[in-house]
Amino acid sequence: RNKAFHGLKKYLHKKRVRKTFLRALDHPSRVIRMYALDALQQAFEPSYLPKFAEKALGDPDKHVRDTACWALGSTQIPEAIPILKQASQDPETTKAAYYALGCICHLESLHILLSALRSYPKHVKRLEEIILVAIALRGVYNIATTIEIPDGTHEEIRQTVLSFLEHPNH
């Protein structure tokens, strides 16, 4: 089945194939659900957003929720930001949500990531926290170097990033 789904991706321009992938989002196999999310993000249509949100926020499998977050980020549509913000509150999908927010070059994504960075203690020690900070910083960099940033936000970015760089325990 996996090979069949992988082979179908080249026919995403056909509505019938996209419908097959949409139905596959409810398949019992997490691998099939993940393949379907990956395929549909390549031919994303706004009507898919509710289904992607359902998978990002409510799928029983963490890997499917992560894949849904990454797929939403790759669409780069601002409408995905509230979904990813909500997904970032789930400790199991925080990394994927932060990564996806960093892919959506929008001021709202930037502010969510800066807020997340400010919420971490300045002496982060656990590897998991260090990884989350690094992913959020990567997202801030990606957004800040891609879109027009209002003047006041430049200082907010500088202060937030410097607060992590000034502490030797990172």
Image (cartoon, rainbow, N blue to C red):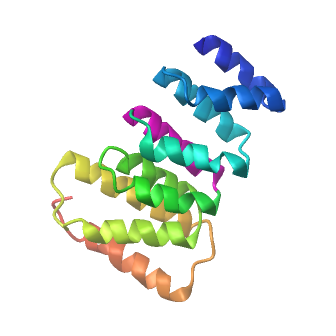
Q: Which sits in the foreground, 2 or 143?
A: 2
Camera-side residue of 97 and 120: 97
- Position of residue 129 in the picture relative to residue 90 (left or right): left
25 on left or right of 93: right
Taking the magenta stretch, the answer to whether it contains residue 75 is yes
Task: Decide which of 67, 166 is in the foreground and name it.
Answer: 67
Which quadrant does the C terminus fall into?
bottom left
Which secondary structure type mostly characterizes the magenta part of the structure? helix
Q: Which residue is located at x 80 percent, y 27 percent?
A: 16
Tell which of 58 and 126 is nearer to you.
Answer: 58
Residue 67 at x, y = what percent?
50, 37
Tell me where residue 13 sits by quadrant: top right
Q: Give the image location of residue 43, x and y in percent.
A: 74, 39
Q: Is residue 63 magenta?
A: yes
Seen in the image, is 33 located left or right of residue 147?
A: left
The vertical placement of 169 against 127, above or below, is below
Q: Position of residue 91 (x, y in %)?
A: 29, 49
Q: How many marks?
A: 0
The residue sitting at 38% across, 55% down in the picture is 88
Instruction: Give residue 5's position: percent from left, percent from top.
Output: 66, 18
Q: Which residues are magenta?
A: 61-76
